Amino acid sequence: MKQVVQNYKSGELALLDVPVPGCKPGGVLVRSAYSLISTGTELMKVSEAGMSMVGKARSRPDQVAKVMQSVATNGLPATYRKVMGKLDSYTPLGYSLCGVVEQVGAGIDDVKVGDLVACAGNEHALHAELNWVPKNLYAPVPDGLAPRHAAFGTVGSIAMQGVRQGEPQLGEVALVIGLGLIGQLVVQLLTASGVRVVGADPDPARCELAERLGAAACGDPSSAAVENSVAELTGGHGVDQVYLAAGGGSNQPVELAARLCRDRGRVVDIGKCRLDLPWNAYYEKELDVRFSRSYGPGRYDPSYELEGRDYPIGYVRWTERRNLACFLDLAARGRVDVEPLISHIAGFDDAVETYRSLKDGELKAVAVLFRYPEQAAETETPETPVKAPELAVPAVKRSGGEGPAPVRAAKTPVRLAFVGAGNYATSMLLPHLARREGVELSTVVTTTALSAANAQRKFGFAEATTDLDAVLGDKSIDAVFVVTRHSSHAELTRQALLAGKTVFVEKPLALTEDELAGVLAAVEESGNDRLQVGFNRRFSPLLQEARNRFGARTGPASLRYLVNAGRLTHGSWYLQQGTEGSRFAGEGGHFIDTAGWLLDADPVSVYAVASSGNEDLQVVLRYADESTATISYVTTGAPGFPKETLDLVADGKVLRLDDFVRASVHSRKRWVSSRLPKARDKGQSAELAAFVKAVRTGGPMPVPLESLVATTAATLAVQSALAAGAPVTLASTR
């Protein structure tokens, strides 16, 4: 299928062939009929992409701050790879469309195949021939409403949420500053609510259009016309509400709002304009400044938008889906007229040229629609804690099954498939594999079409798809990498093992004991134990050298591992503990595996204590030879402090690791790593080399399966120990 995309690094716009998205449970697959270009938001994004790197940095200081923090934590090379990987990727455009339901996912019963729906979301209502849309981001189109009009649903919801934030009442007077697409819709919604409206915009054509659509008066904000109209309509008191629907870098809108708003009036920001509030003016009138967050309550809440959890109507009357349905109803009943807003309808094949014309100013438009091929026949004329004293580590059993992978000919490339192509895969794994001789990147599978297409373009995959079954059934593929969200790791690993593939799964292997048992059941059923978990730190060259310098030990050891994990940014999917597990469950296996590798043993018991909310953890691991390892996993440390520091003490010797930058061993002779490395090498390259070698030769996997299982079981036992308030005993698998 085709999709409009943009490369944020180069500014290139393209109509790209991408895989068809799969129809996941909880949503529907929609074939687009019309999609709406947001001439404000989208053109701003297109313009930013055309800026120099300095210009991009100036326009997004929030992102620059994140980059600098990443440099302090992860080092310059790793940060550079991650940032360039993000910039040099195709990103989608679009967020408002109307289309026909082509496929219905499990759990959906309010629409059927063939129904017309309006769709929302900058990840789900894209300028693409097909989109998967979750339940709370679509609404059925009422009978009689034309598809091209229903395509305004999302933008209409944005305007509606802004109006709701202003709390207009019958007979009031409002000022709308900025008469672009959103401003024109705000004018109509206010008029339909019994509010008299004054509009302000420097474009005379837009002022004239707003007056035709119900505004009492409109004019240039820099002229006296607007102020005179407000004085006449309000008896000199000023308007009750001001709606800022303008963009740009001028502070004129907020200054005009203060001048023309009545005492204790409301100012609602809907657009993205400069907001240097003149303190005296806003203080003296005690103005109430409000922000309108996109389509309404539910926006940016993954449990609402992606998981389909609705808010009770008694507590949240107008969610983003209810706003969408309400706007469609108003349009169907003629209370809002979007037809006069349509300046141009372009064929979808002309998408790139249409954006160029808009950006260059050749096409003057309030609203532009893309018409998809299926609509070609239509006219182009606008229309409670449980004690767990013991946790059994599942025994590793292997049936006859397929057994070890066959040895490959020396010159035959190892063919790899990737399931998932997110930040970690594209910054830490694929760059190493793409340049490794004897490796062929065969297929990349993702749930979103564009991420698969990006990975194919950047790393040279032969194919990109959203069809996992096709990959698992392809006998020419030797190994499958599972690099998806944590909640899917165990199931995808199980499926790949049963399909006879060698599997590399990023940590964690499992989030629950049942998931771990399921993976081991697949090993037993298939006889396929060709599994590697991405515990990469044991492969770090610096740590391996330090371990060799430390040498063998004879007595018990004491190991201390401080992990300065830091706080997560708002919206991170790591915070979705209900589905993705705790943060330690997702990351803690790294540190438990490193400790076990340094001590050459698996833990026999786990004890853990936590601060409120279980964010800061102290985990104590005991080993059969009376060695102990204490892992301090904290989120409240200083951001500038190294992320990982480790001390190992035994037999009168001390090994110290400082964040994979420097290592030292203190014994009769002191050894210190000679120079700072060019980058923090946490072992990914060496780990992948060992994995590829095992796949090629059919030899042993880099880490024994028993060790992977023991580490996973110990990680899961941390939660059990927290609940029990007592140590949890682990059974040995060796």
Image (spheres, rainbow, N blue to C red):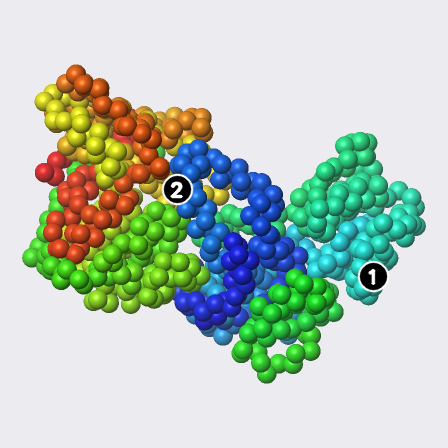
Q: Nearer the viewer, residue 82 or 202?
A: 82
Q: Is residue 134 left or right of residue 251?
A: left
- In the picture shown, does residue 383 fall above or below 531? below
- N-term-proximal mark, 2 vs 1: 2
Q: 10 Å neighbourhood of mark 2: few (<14), some, or many (≥20)?
A: some
Q: Looking at this view, is 283 or 578 the one in front?
A: 283
Residue placed at 66% from the left, 78% from the top?
Answer: 380
Q: At 65% from the left edge and 81% from the top edge, which residue is drawn? A: 379
Q: Quadrant of residue 677?
A: top left
Foreground disc of the pair 2, 1: 2
Looking at the rendered structure, the secondary structure element under dot 2 is helix
User: What residue is pinned by disc 1?
Assistant: 204
Q: Identify the residue under disc 2.
A: 78
Q: How dense is the environment of label 1, judged by Cα within 10 Å: few (below 14), some, or many (20 and up)?
A: few
Q: CA distance from mark 2 to mark 1?
A: 51 Å
Q: Residue at x 41, y 26 (%)?
A: 641
Quadrant hosting residue 1? bottom left
- Out of 524 and 689, give the one closest to the viewer: 689
Q: Can residue 31 be seen here? A: yes
**Residue at far front of view:** 674
Viewer-side residue, 323 vs 428: 428
**Relative image position of residue 713 (x, y in whole percent):** 22, 39
In the rendered view, tell whether residue 652 sits above or below residue 332. Answer: above
Q: Quadrant of the C terminus?
A: top left
Determine whether, in the image, residue 35 is placed left or right of residue 288. left
